Image (cartoon, rainbow, N blue to C red):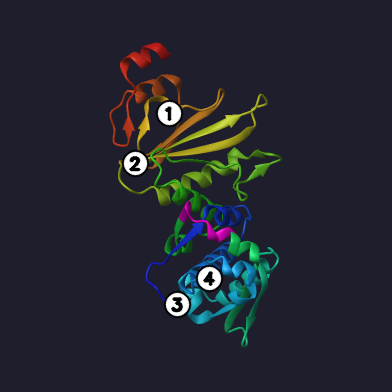
Amino acid sequence: MFVKNPRVQLSWQLYYKLIHQNLSVPSYRVMLGIVLQHEFQEHWHDIYCDLPEQTESWAELSEFRKIVGLSGRDWKKQCASAVEELSGTGWFADIELVHGNRSIKWTLDRAIVEAQLDRDKYVLLSLEEIAACRTSLEHQFVSELTRTRQMKAPEFDCHALKAVPKRGNNIDWKRFRPRLERFFDKWGRDEGTSFVVGTARSHLGDVTNVTIRTRTSHTNWFGWALYKFPPNSRVYLYENGAMRQLGAEEIFRKVREKVPGFIPAKKRQLKRAA
């Protein structure tokens, strides 16, 4: 099963199953490795919806764990923990460690095969990038960043990410912001990359959602769109290694800037907006 820098193609339906399950880091990696193995075995076919028992497969852990990025002295414990967690998702008819815990064996549930069939829209995740994630929140963030990477105007909302720190039904911005900045530091290193963050707020001041927008030399944000958020939102800009809040006047100036990945608004549009 060895491949160099493997990438896993997930249908949108299967991707959202994974991202909304809030899997631990080892379990997310193992699940992606399982999907990749079935890609090689050409199991993503409607015939297996009627015969899901024929999706039974196995892998030697000594090789499998390197591909999915399980390392360190406790990698066997990580594998055992992942198998236990995945067995409770309902995605497998059976999953277990066998041969003295030297191999992992599983049979997919029909629903997972069906979810992966329609890949007109898909997400292509790098196992190398996922292996570099240290927390569930980070691999959810990186997965969403990857999903939106090919969009002309890439953005995603954070409220649906299960690992985002919450306070009741709202996002705990005080805890979330420093983690977000660390992710930007780590995953936004490419020259010319910046992030615009909008925090939607209730009348009580609670953060109800956080929207992240990416600007690079390849994006195509137009006019006010990059900085336009619901009323009473606070807007932040991350660039050059720092994140700061933007005021209305600075946003107005930035809308007129000519920078890669952003099409400035026309003067007549600015006058009309003013």
C-alpha span from label 2 to label 1: 15 Å
Disc on res. 1: 3
Q: Specify start and end residues of the magenta stretch as a single range.
A: 115-123
Residues at badges 3 and 4 in contact (C-beta under 8 Å)?
no
Q: Quadrant of the N terminus?
A: bottom left
Identify the amino acid type marked 3.
Answer: Met
The residue mark sitting in front, 2 or 4, is 4
C-alpha span from label 3 to label 4: 15 Å
C-alpha span from label 2 to label 4: 37 Å
In the image, residue 170 lies in the stretch drawn in magenta: no
C-alpha span from label 3 to label 2: 35 Å
Disc on res. 133: none
Identify the amino acid type marked 4.
Answer: His
Mark 1 — residue? 225
C-alpha span from label 3 to label 1: 44 Å
Residue appearing at x 59%, y 43% in the figure: 175
Q: Mark 1: few, some, or many residues within 10 Å (few <14, many ≥20)?
A: few
Q: Which of disc 4 and disc 2 is earlier in sequence?
A: 4
Q: Which of disc 1 and disc 4 is earlier in sequence?
A: 4
Q: Quadrant of the C terminus?
A: top left
Badge 2 element? loop
Mark 4 — residue? 43
